[in-house]
Amino acid sequence: MVKREAAVSADALEDDYLVEDIIEEGDTQGIAVEEDFEENAPADQGSASIKRKVVEDMAEEPTKKKKKRKPKKNNDPFQGVDVSSKPAAEQYDYILDRQKRAKSTWSAIEHDEQAPAISAFLDSQKFTSPHTIEFLPSFVKFGAAGHKKLLKEPPVEAMAAPAIIIITHSAIRATDLVRGLKEFDKAAKIAKLFAKHLKVEEQARFLAETRLHFAVGTPHRVKELIELGHLKLDRLELLVVDTEKNAKRLDIFENDAVNGPLFDLFGTHITPRMKEGKTKLGIF
């Protein structure tokens, strides 16, 4: 019969007495489990730490900035320019630039030969009134030598041969400009040289029967009538180019619908007279 030891209270234990001493050698199952847990812990902690590291790395990775689109460089030194108020030298540079853009197939020699002669430009800076229709008669008087003759009946040689031609971008604008010249229409009728509602044959007949001081029209129709022999330039003293901008804010030198015929008209028919000192150019 095994003799059982009496239970000892914790208070009765000596200070240096360890509870572990009562665990018999070999009775380590509970400790082993605890050690197993501690051995397995680093694997789980390692997995968690790796995840934390990935998250931290992602957080530390700098956010990629979206590339800002660089604004396109403006290669047009004359964009938005009101050429009518500029000095003659700047007007010449402007027209030559627009001619090069419109006639890109021309050679450098052709551009120089067909561009308006700078000596023919009126000094628009000396014209101090606004460039509006109500002041168009004043601008004509400013540019035409001996303008008082424009208030008198034209001579016989003025048949189909105006002293003043005004070029603009559309038939509607041409009609408005004709109205603006009403103080001159008492002395002579004004030729309307544009395509809207008017046939070439009708205009040819009018020109053949009428002495003229003024003709107002669009580049294509004016050029066509000249080349058909119906419109004569023998008396042309002043060519006025109206630079009113259209709905797209383009003037006649920039407007692709009309600038081609305009530069053809200049180069073929007007520039030679300018270089000879026979015709002046007014930018209105």
Image (cartoon, helix red, strand yellow):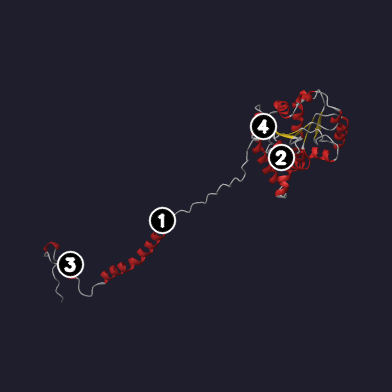
Q: Quadrant of residue 205?
A: top right
Q: Which mark is residue 117?
A: 2
Distance between mark 4 and mark 2 Cα atoms:
15 Å
- Nearer the observer: mark 3 or 2; the answer is 2
Q: Which residue is mark 1?
A: 60
Which mark is first along the chain, 4 or 1?
A: 1
Q: Which mark is residue 90?
A: none
Residue 249 visible to the viewer: no
Quadrant where the C terminus sits is top right
Q: Amino acid at mark 4?
A: Ser
Distance between mark 2 and mark 1 Cα atoms:
68 Å
Which residue is rendered at x = 14% and y = 63% of the image?
Answer: 10
Tell me if 8 is positioned left or right of 29 in this view: left
Which mark is first along the chain, 4 or 3?
A: 3
Q: Which residue is mark 4?
A: 124
Q: Amino acid at mark 1?
A: Glu
Q: What percent of the width, then of the height, locates residue 60? A: 41, 56
Residue 37 visible to the viewer: yes
Q: What percent of the width, then of the height, locates residue 2? A: 15, 75
